[in-house]
Image: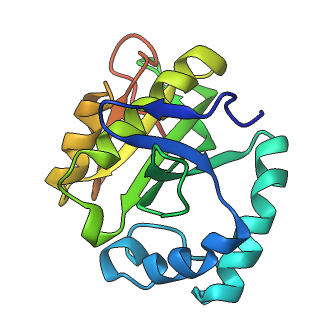
Amino acid sequence: MELPDPPLVDRSAGVALRAWRTADAPALAEAWATPDIAGRATVPGGGGVEAAERWIGGGPARTAAGLALDLVIGPVDGGTEVWGEVGVIQLRLVSAGPDASSRRRTVWDMGWWLRPEHRGRGRARAGAALLASWVARSLDEPLIARVDIASPASAAVAVGAGLIRRGRYDADHDLWLAFHLGDGDESPRRS
C-alpha cells in the first residue's frame, strides 16, 4: 500500500490528510495523554514524545507492508497543526455461517480521534469520509469501523463517512460497514 497521492483534501470542510512527521511527535504525545483518546487508541510504549517519535518512524514500514495507514487530520493550507488522526489497519475476520462453517476474510478497520479543542467542527467526519472514499477507490478489501457504543459523536462520524451500522461487534462496540461483507446473518469477529 502507498500513501494517497495527491494528498486527500476536502476544501469545503478545510480538512486535509497528510503523513505523520517527526515534528508532530509532541502533539501526538499530548493527544495520547488525553483520557478519552488513550482509552480508545493503542498507545505504544506508554506514550510520551519518544514513543510518539518511534511510532511515527515506523509508519512508512507499516504502510509499505500493507498493514496500516495512519494520517494526520489537519488544515488544508498544508500547515503543521495536528487536529487529529484517521487511519486503517488490516484486520482478519472470521464469519460464522448459518451451517456453523466459518470463513476468513481481510477487511480494513478504520479509526479516528480528534484533539479536544478541534471537536464539534466536522473535522473527524471530513477526515473519515476522505479516507473511506480513498479506500473504496484504492484497496480491494471492505472497510469497517468498530465504534464505541458510548460515543454518539463517533457514530455521527461513521454516518458522515458513509458507513452503515450493521449491528453489535462486541459488548462495547457496534460494527459499521462501508461495503457489504456477505449475505445472511453473518457475525464478523476478530480471529
What residue lies at 56% left-to-right and 25% top-to-bottom?
135
Locate residue 119: give its quadrant.
bottom left
Looking at the picture, tell me which residue is in the foreground, 105 or 128: 128
The answer to whether 183 is drawn above or below residue 161 in the figure is above
Q: Is residue 13 visible?
A: yes
Above or below 21: residue 152:
above
Query: For the point 57% across and 35% down, which residue is it?
Result: 108
In the image, 46 versus 100, the foreground residue is 46
The location of residue 187, given as percent across then percent down, is: 39, 32
In the picture provided, is 57 more to the left or to the right than 10?
Answer: right
Vertical placement of residue 22 versus 73, above or below: below
In the rendered image, which quarter contains the N terminus?
top right
Number of marks: 0
Image position, residue 177 (x, y; %): 37, 27
In the displayed structure, 44 sits above or below 109; it is below
- The colour scheme used to paint the residues is rainbow
What residue appears at the point 77 percent right and 39 percent down from the top-left corner?
66
Residue 144 location, quadrant: top left
Residue 85, image x, y percentages: 48, 56
Q: Is residue 168 visible in this depiction of the protein?
A: no
Residue 36 percent coordinates (x, y): 31, 75
Would residue 78 be found to the left or right of residue 31 on screen? Answer: right
Query: Who's the residue at 19% across and 41% down the image?
Result: 156
Left or right: residue 90 compared with residue 144: right
Outermost residue, top side: 183
Q: Nearer the viewer, residue 18 or 92?
A: 18
